[in-house]
Amino acid sequence: MISDPLVIAGRTFGSRLVVGTGKYPSNAVMADAHRASGAEMVTVAVRRVNVSDKSKESLIDYIDRDRIFILPNTAGCYTAEDAIRTARLGREVGLSNWVKLEVIGDERTLFPDNVALLEATRVLVGEGFVVLPYTNDDPVICRKLEEAGAAAVMPLGAPIGSGLGIQNPNNIRIIKDQARVPVIVDAGVGTASDAAIAMELGADGVLMNTAIALATDPVAMASAMKLAVEAGRLAYRAGRIPMRPYASASSPVDGRITPVAVAAGGRAGA
Amino acid sequence: MTIRLNGEPFEIAGPVTISALLAELKIDSRIVAVEHNVVVVKRQQYDSTMVREGDEIEIVRFVGGG
């Protein structure tokens, strides 16, 4: 029995860290990093087979399917139609009807095209997909995606691969406050504290790829992220102290010995 | 006859099923998905779906991504 599980569309995950499979130095390092991260769900992209060169190793061979659930994404799609086609192809590979839905609106920032994203979400929900849309840290679009039937909402912390961390913590807090589906901060995490902050803001999970894959030591970073997500979640549930502008002493005021200056009539200690 | 395969012209001898095309390309049908003229082909239909002159075929599989 997992305590404090992450539940998405009725499926239970013991880990709140979701990781990607892209940009690793090798498939072997990726597999080690996945193990170190404790992740139970990883994302994959859908791309053309190289018909003239099939010597490449299959990515799937390096994913431990006994403990890891594969989530196809629609990365690289700039229209709702292409994202819908890609989602359908991802489903037909035959592992599940889940999709991390991305409809990109801008090549440099990789920010989503939320108009197309909403349309694609509606279509795919209608076809029975479990849709996890990657979107902005915008509470309004998150609410609309939830109303359209998204199984979770995935607001970005910062641009994909930027490592900038949580750029708008207050928005993440607002999104979590309003959502009735899980909120997974997806994109922009750079180091462990970013993941912890996301969880402290109340996020139900964190999704990252670059922060681990391109770290100098991906396996060590994967361990760090596992701990950070756990620490952030524990801290969130433990109920933090409020922030105050001034000090509030930790040691009691009563019972202090009489200060020297008062006893000697004003002469300070040597 | 010529078809369009993954965005490139590709020559095949004559109309073939998706299954036969995958076999000829030595592609493991279990780890791919196929689109035939912009429609995803259900794998139960690989044996019965014919590829003809001018058809557009996309064969995809999972790769690393975020």
Image (cartoon, coloured by chain):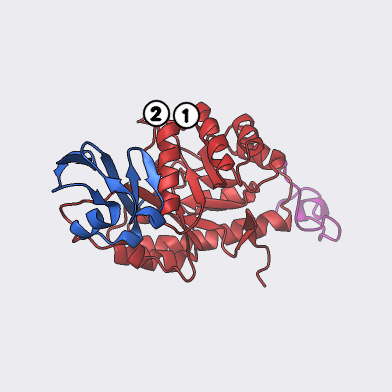
Chain colours: A red, B blue
Residue B1 picture quarter: top left
The residue identified by callout 2 is A106
Q: Amino acid at mark 2?
A: Asp
Residue B36 picture quarter: top left
Residue A246 drawn in magenta: yes
The C terminus of chain A lies in which quarter of the figure?
bottom right
**Left/right of residue A266 with respect to residue A105 in the rendered view:** right
Specify the segment rendered in magenta: A244-270
Question: Image height check: is A269 above or below A64?
Answer: above
Could you tell me if the residues under marks 1 and 2 are in contact, i.e. CB atoms within 8 Å?
yes
Q: Residue at x 59, y 65 (%)?
A: A14
**Left/right of residue A219 with respect to residue A231 in the rendered view:** left
Q: Secondary structure at mark 1?
A: loop
Residue A193's x, y, as percent?
A: 52, 52
Q: Residues within 10 Å of mark 2 (few under 14, many from 20)?
A: few
Which mark is on residue A113? 1
Q: Amino acid at mark 1?
A: Asp
Question: Image height check: is A17 above or below A117?
Answer: below
